[in-house]
Amino acid sequence: MPSLEQIAKERQKLNQIIRRFFCDRGFVEVETPLLVRSPGMEPNLCPFETTVLESDGRCYPAGLITSPEYSMKKLLGLGMQKIFTLTKVFRNEEELGGSHNPEFTMLEWYVQGEDYQACMDETQALVESCTQEFDASLPVFDRKRVYDLFLEYTGVDLDKATPEILQDACHQLSIHFVLTDTESDLFYRLFLARVEPQFSSGSTFVYDYPIYQAALSQLTSDKKYGQRFELYVNGLELCNGFTELTDAKEQRKRFEEEAQERAQSQKTIFPIDETLLRLLPSVQQPSYGNALGVDRLHMIVTRRTCIKDVLLFPASTLFKNKI
């Protein structure tokens, strides 16, 4: 077990490496709010909810951010070109331990004028820089399309897949599902059971997710996939990047679809961030963004397998009466 002082010094060093990496590339570090009116619309995430109270008794529903994405994109729309932030983010209803903590540190960065392929290049350079500074080694980087992975490990052709085909694949592969599962739910069940285990070793960029997993990304030329990628290092999901969607009309449509999914799951539906939609058209095309878990990066560069070994106050000790 590393000492608290060792963990603190490692994190200080890692933060310094990250800041130097981006400052050397002309980025500006920004601070974004943690407490907002619209903390996120993703159907699979559960923000921590609270209420903002004024002294006169007025109150406003609010939540802690699951990502600084909305605020960062507003800054792009207001004219900033290359920005990054190191910030705390919060996600409820997740495991306390393993590779999860309800409060964790996120590095998020954005560039106007380049797409997700350039972002993958930059992400690889960042991770390699951090591991070299810690005298750690990484497996050779690889890039694989979700389409190819699904065809190989589930037998599903995502170009032709329907919800019924995904249900049948789950049945054939003995993967549990329920009839109320959305197309996105079924995809995710198959991905977790059959595709993700293939990343137990190696450094793999997985890219071009189906449109129902496109999140806030632009679509590929065939309009079937989102220009989105994730990086797995030795089985650990490290980041989630995009060529950013700047079409406000399409973004509103996706927000509304996500709201419907949240309603079906009986989750809180947060108001659409109208300021974000108003500023999106001012963002240059293409532009990219990436969200990277710093605690997990800390795990990678120190070769640790549990998030509690890179945190001074892991949630498992704060809420489970453990020392």
Image (cartoon, rainbow, N blue to C red):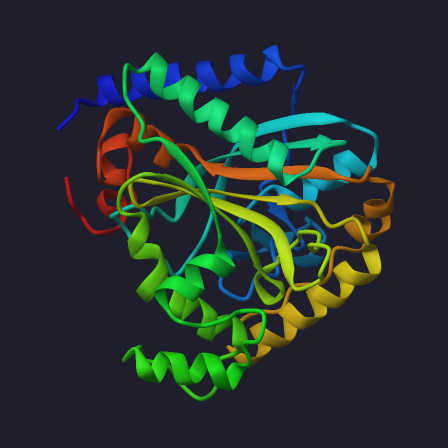
Q: Where is residue 149 in the image (x, y as percent from the top left)?
A: 42, 58
Side of 159 relative to 283 (left or right): left
**Residue, x 72% and y 53% (percent of image)?**
56
Q: Residue 131's image quarter? A: top left
Judged from this view, the residue extending furthest toward the bottom is: 179
Q: Where is residue 9 in the image (x, y as percent from the top left)?
A: 31, 15
**Residue, x 51% and y 77% (percent of image)?**
265
Q: Residue 295's image quarter? A: top left
- 213 or 108, which is in the foreground? 213
Q: Is residue 317 above or below residue 26?
A: below
Image quadrant in which the N terminus is located: top left
Q: In this view, does 131 lie above or below 284?
A: above
Residue 45 in sight: no
Residue 170 in sight: yes
Q: In this view, does 140 lie above or below 227?
A: above
**Residue, x 35% and y 15% (percent of image)?**
132
**Residue, x 70% and y 65% (percent of image)?**
254
- 25 or 98, which is in the foreground? 25
- 42 or 157, which is in the foreground? 157
